[in-house]
Image (spheres, rainbow, N blue to C red):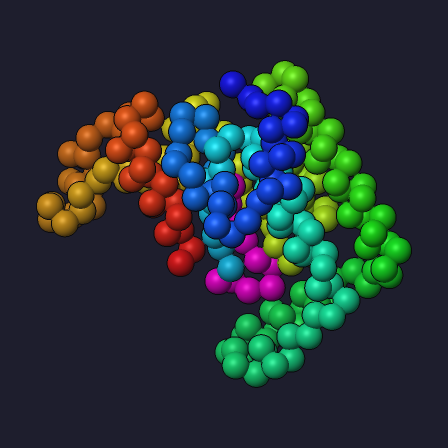
Amino acid sequence: MSRSLQIYHERWHNYSYLNEPWEEDMTIESCVIVESARSTPMGEGAHTLPDFGHAICFYQYFRIPNEFEPLEQQDHSSDVETLLPRLEVLEQSWEQRQPKLSNDQLHDLQSATDQLLDDLLGEFVQNGYQTGMSNRLQEIVNNAMPDFELDEVYVLPGDLEVLLSSFGNPLTDYDAYENEEEAEAHAPAFDLNNPEHRAALKECITMFGR
């Protein structure tokens, strides 16, 4: 069941590093988001949010405001000196593609993005998750974030099969068998209603990209 708009806004207005929503236990309606950095091939990561509404708020209150804040003052020259030459080429290539926006343009883009995310959150609260909402979230986020891309959005329980296909069955014991095929064949079936299974899956997702 989706929560009210007030609950979402209050939860994220009161966000703090001591109370991070993505640290909460995985539930049968959690939403998993997978991001990658455009400027480096080593910037993949994934987060588990309590539901799709929280995934929207993650970008509205946390990721996008943080991305907009340092745009004018980004200076990667000191970082590049410590990277491999290939990464330096990627860095320079991305900087050439970055839009050069004024303060007013940045403000307008952030305001428009905030409104689109707020509208999507309102639809989710009113109607629940509907097909196409994940694609809309990706489009909004990817049009706004300069250096990161929202690659995948998995909304449980409907996307469980494809999520397990991407991350694997977390119950597989690879050390107990001679090869991966045998271990995966003997792995217990994943049960989304089992809290221990969900905890194992969350740990697997959290480790992604590290």
Q: Quadrant of residue 39?
A: bottom right
Asked if residue 35 is among those painted magenta in the image, a careful observer would answer yes
Foreground residue among 172 and 113: 113
Look at the image and say whether residue 94 sits in the magenta stretch. Answer: no
Q: Is residue 13 visible?
A: yes
Say if 79 sits above or below 189 in the image. Answer: below
Residue situated in front as seen by the camera: 198 or 184? 198
- x and y percent of residue 73 in the render? 74, 70
Q: Residue at x 19, y 34 (%)?
A: 187
Q: Looking at the rendering, which quadrant does residue 5 occupy? A: top right
Q: For the point 26% across and 33% down, which residue is it?
A: 196
Q: Is residue 174 left or right of residue 83?
A: left
The part of the chain drawn in magenta is: 33-42
- Decide: is 164 above or below 206: above
Picture layout, residue 97 above or below residue 2: below
The vertical placement of 205 against 11, above or below, is below
